[in-house]
Amino acid sequence: MFIVAVDGLPGSGKTTAIRSLSRQFRLLRMSFKRNSIGNAPFAKAMVPMAKKYKIGQLERSLIFFTLRMDQFAAAEIEGRSCDIVVMDRFFGSSFVYNINGDQIPQKYLEWAKQTLETKIEFVLFFDVPLQLARSRKKSDTLKDDDFAQKLDHNYRKVALEQGWLTIDATQSPEKVADDCFQIIIERFMQK
């Protein structure tokens, strides 16, 4: 099982790169799965429930934290039947979206980090300026300027603190996908 996580602001190019990775791995005859929050078994019921709350509310944060745990469980199952699973975001997002440091109890976040992060090979952080991310994708998450700036700051802070590998997501989508592919295949071969 080889699980990689990709994270970054909405509009940073995560999903676009993962789609391209799928094609590249198929050319090598390697099995590949994209795992997103939609893979979480309870996503269909819980996402609409979460969206009833405003971004930043504790209830919304806890529902998405739970979904990220569920998403990881799905990635583990998928990893048993394929070579590589790439998670489109993961529970690390909970650290980032915990804007004021008081939404999700720190002990839950630390538990997730200690328990689950050892099962993820590494995290690719798609680094892109906030304005560029906004120009690429209309996102409710980035509408409130204060929240978006805090989110951008937290992504950079958490990526640095957690040792996430930074991808320059300002480059062309092809170059971003190629950079990701090179890192993933190199680390996969080392394992």
Image (tube, grey):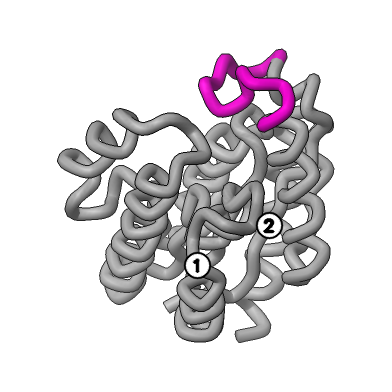
- Secondary element under disc 2, as helix, strand or loop, is strand
Query: Which residue type carries mark 1?
Result: Pro
Q: CA distance from mark 1 to mark 2?
A: 25 Å
Q: Tell whether 135 sits left or right of 108.
A: right
Report which residue position mark 2 lands on: 124
Q: Is there a contact, CB below 8 Å, between mark 1 and mark 2? A: no
Label 2 Cα crowd, 10 Å radius (few <14 / some 14-19 / many 20+): many
Q: Quadrant of the N terminus?
A: bottom left
Residue 15 placement (x, y as % from top left): 53, 36
Is residue 80 found left or right of 89 in the rendered image?
Answer: left
Residue under the image location 38 percent in, 54 percent down = 62
Q: Is residue 117 visible?
A: no
Residue 72 % position (x, y): 37, 65
- Give how far across and how far down residue 50 sits, in percent: 31, 38
Q: Is residue 129 left or right of residue 52?
A: right
Instruction: Return the residue nearer the eye: 13 or 142.
Output: 142
Q: In the picture shown, does residue 166 fall above or below 81? A: above
The magenta segment is: 135-147
Q: Residue at x 29, y 62 (%)?
A: 70
For residue 2, side relative to residue 156 (left or right) = left
Is 142 magenta? The answer is yes
Residue at 57% x, 15% y is 138
Q: Is residue 8 visible?
A: yes
Q: Quadrant of residue 16?
A: top right
Q: Which residue is mark 1?
A: 105
Q: Is residue 111 magenta?
A: no
- Please report the residue visible at 71 percent of the width from the left and 52 percent of the height from the top: 125
Q: In the rendered image of this protein, does residue 20 appear above or below residue 165?
A: above
Residue 188's disc number: none
Q: Determine which quarter of the picture holds residue 75.
A: bottom left
